[in-house]
Image (spheres, rainbow, N blue to C red):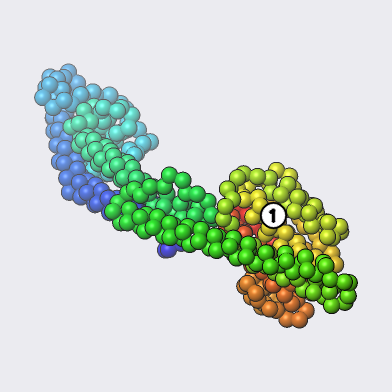
Amino acid sequence: MKRYLPKSLFGRSLLIFVVPVAVMQGLIAWAFFEQHWETVTSRLSEGVAGDVAIMTELFESVGGNETAFEPLADAAYRNMQLSVDFREGELLPTSRRSSFFRTLDRTLRRSLTAAMDNEVWFDTTRYPAYVDIRVQTDNGVLRFIAVRERVFATTGHIFLLWLFGATAVLSLVSVIFIRNQVKPIRRLADAAKQFGRGEDAGDFKPAGAREVREAAHAFIDMRQRISRHLEQRTSMLAGVSHDLRTPLTRLKLQLALLPESEEREEAIRDLSEMEHMLEEYLAFARGQVNEETVEADVSAIVAETVEAARRADPDIALTADEGLLANVRPGVLKRGIANLISNACAYGNTCEVSVRRGVRRLEIIVDDDGPGIPEDQREEAFKPFARLDEARNMNREGVGLGLAIARDVARGHGGEVDLSDSPLGGLRAIMRLPLA
């Protein structure tokens, strides 16, 4: 049953209200029709059936003389609201039309059958305000036209109208009330998603029930603490970067003044590697702070990133669909894509990049023909500083942060990065991002 139940809070709250009300209204309607309406209808039908039986006996008592029966018919019209007409030589119709409420026909048929022995035919559908009853006699057919209110209880539909009308009004009020209660929860969820992606939640304010307000205040306090932590980390990284760059610059100058030698070249390479490692550490730690989210053409961003990567490897191939708009931080996204491309170029001889539209998402695919990563080690490859087997060791120019940064960037945009086998024989990295 769980698969058929609503998944949202609004749907479940509405179900909690609708089911008891529907059951209650159904029981009330059943009790009304079973205990009251059908009983009243039976009594009315029996009364009309008795009048028809009396008039039939009176007609037969005068030997079927229409002239002698006329005063009796006039009295029936005045006192019983029963119009009587004799049709000499006719027979009863053979066709029947059933009422929408079959209970009406069943009740009237039972009453007429119990009141007289003559063959009877009736129609409750031809005239909206009347019931046509015909009785077979020896000389012809006696036709009775009775007012519908005398045969059936006509207030049943009014009761149902009030019943379902009240249900509709209560349901409408409940929908409005539940929507107002769910709206603050949705706003809180949206604010949490925006903050998780590094976006500004804007004018988010606590609203709704007391428990929802408490959760909103707790979220605001948490957001402020995390923001302070990020600011402190950024300030610390800026200081570390400044303090480390100064001695590295001095070392570069000192090495430049030394005479050329094999030891000098090795020291320069070690210094360059240290500087590159420092840049990767800082890029990983900086994350996605200090950049606003904008709606941008991802295909153009990927093209710019590939063009920059071609300075080091001119053979990178690119195929991209046009008009793929998404809400992104362009600089951060370029960093994530550049890491995927640099990994592919570092471990393979061929690198192909493609951008395509998926189902409500866009996909940035980077393929290489390198050694790849075994399926059981792919999740491990996303961990910072993770070391894999010798075939795919950590980045030869870095510290093994490329995939970690790329996944962090994708998740910061509400997406994900997955690894699989490439058609080129190596590794395929797919970055999925939600479309605008």
Q: Nearer the viewer, residue 250 or 408?
A: 250
Residue at (30, 51) in percent of width and height: 209
268 relative position to 93: left or right: right
The mark total stands at: 1
In this image, 191 relative to 279: left or right?
Answer: left
Residue 425 appearing in the image: no
Q: Residue at x 15, y 22 (%)?
A: 77
Q: Residue at x 32, y 32 (%)?
A: 125
Residue 213 visible at all: yes
* Position in image of residue 67 (x %, y %): 17, 18
Assign the N terminus to one quadrant of the image. bottom left
Residue at image location 68% in from the left, 45% down from the top: 297
Pointer 1 residue: 334
Indicate left or right for 45 with 269 as reference: left
Which amino acid type is marked by label 1?
A: Lys
**SS for tag 1?**
helix
Q: Percent x, y for residue 60?
A: 17, 30
Badge 1: residue crowd in 10 Å (few <14, some 14–19, many ≥20): some
**x then y, percent, for residue 280:** 67, 66
Q: Position of residue 54 (x, y in %)?
A: 13, 33
Task: Decide: is 210 above or below 158.
Answer: below
* Viewer-proximal residue among 197 and 99: 197
- Residue 106 vs 313, above or below: the answer is above
Closest to the observer: 409 or 54? 409
Q: Is residue 388 above or below residue 181?
A: below
Which quadrant holds residue 137? top left
In the rendered image, which quarter is residue 275 located in?
bottom right
| Furthest-bottom residue in this view | 390
- In the image, is residue 36 above or below residue 380? above
